[in-house]
Amino acid sequence: QVQLVESGGGLVQPGGSLRLSCAASANIFRFYAMGWYRQAPGKQRELVAAISSTRNTNYADSVKGRFTISRDNTKNTLYLQMNSLKPEDTAVYYCNGEPPWSSGSWGQGTQVTVSS
């Protein structure tokens, strides 16, 4: 089973930026569409950005124009550049396939907190 390890989260002020990374344990990564998801306290997990194997991208309306998803298939790594962060972006961020792989494929996620 592919393991996914997210990193790069932290505490940032409103208007700030963060870059998240997701390392996959297997080179099958390059064959799959991938997504960044987030889950805020008391809310369901939601897809915020997706990238196909051919690098077509899609974004949730709430992050469009502020977030950029990218991938480096040579490193089996997925990225999420987050700019102009808002308090409502506070959540645990996860990567997974798009659609998600098995329920056991979720990593630990990385916490993003946007606060002054």
Image (cartoon, rainbow, N blue to C red):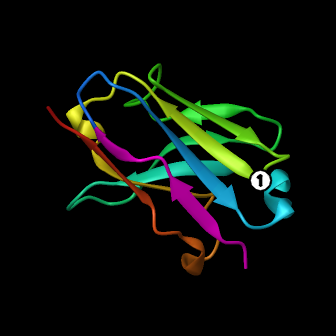
Q: Report if residue 8 lies within the magenta region.
A: yes
Q: Nearer the viewer, residue 46 or 84?
A: 84
Circle 1 packing at 10 Å, graded few (<14), some (14-19), many (20+), is some
Q: Position of residue 31 (x, y in %)?
A: 85, 54
Quadrant holding the N terminus: bottom right
Does residue 58 sit above or below 29 in this rendering? Answer: above
Which residue is drawn at the image coordinates 80% and 44% (left, top)?
A: 53
Does residue 16 sit above or below 9 in this rendering? Answer: above
Q: Report if residue 101 lies within the magenta region.
A: no
Which residue is drawn at the image coordinates 83% and 52% (left, top)?
A: 30
Name the amino acid type tagged 1.
Asn
Does residue 30 sit above or below 69 in this rendering? Answer: below
Q: Residue furthest left?
A: 116
Which residue is drawn at the image coordinates 58% and 47% (left, top)?
A: 21
Q: Position of residue 12 (x, y in %)?
A: 28, 35
Q: Position of residue 37 (x, y in %)?
A: 47, 52
Q: Is residue 116 left or right of residue 16?
A: left
Magenta range is: 1-11
Mark 1: secondary structure: loop
What is the number of callouts on the image?
1
Q: Nearer the viewer, residue 50 or 20?
A: 20
Q: Is residue 39 left or right of residue 5?
A: left
Q: Nearer the viewer, residue 50 or 72?
A: 72
Quadrant of residue 43 within the rendered picture: bottom left
Q: Position of residue 67 (x, y in %)?
A: 49, 29
Q: Is residue 52 something one can see in this rendering?
A: yes
The residue at which mark 1 appears reads as: 76
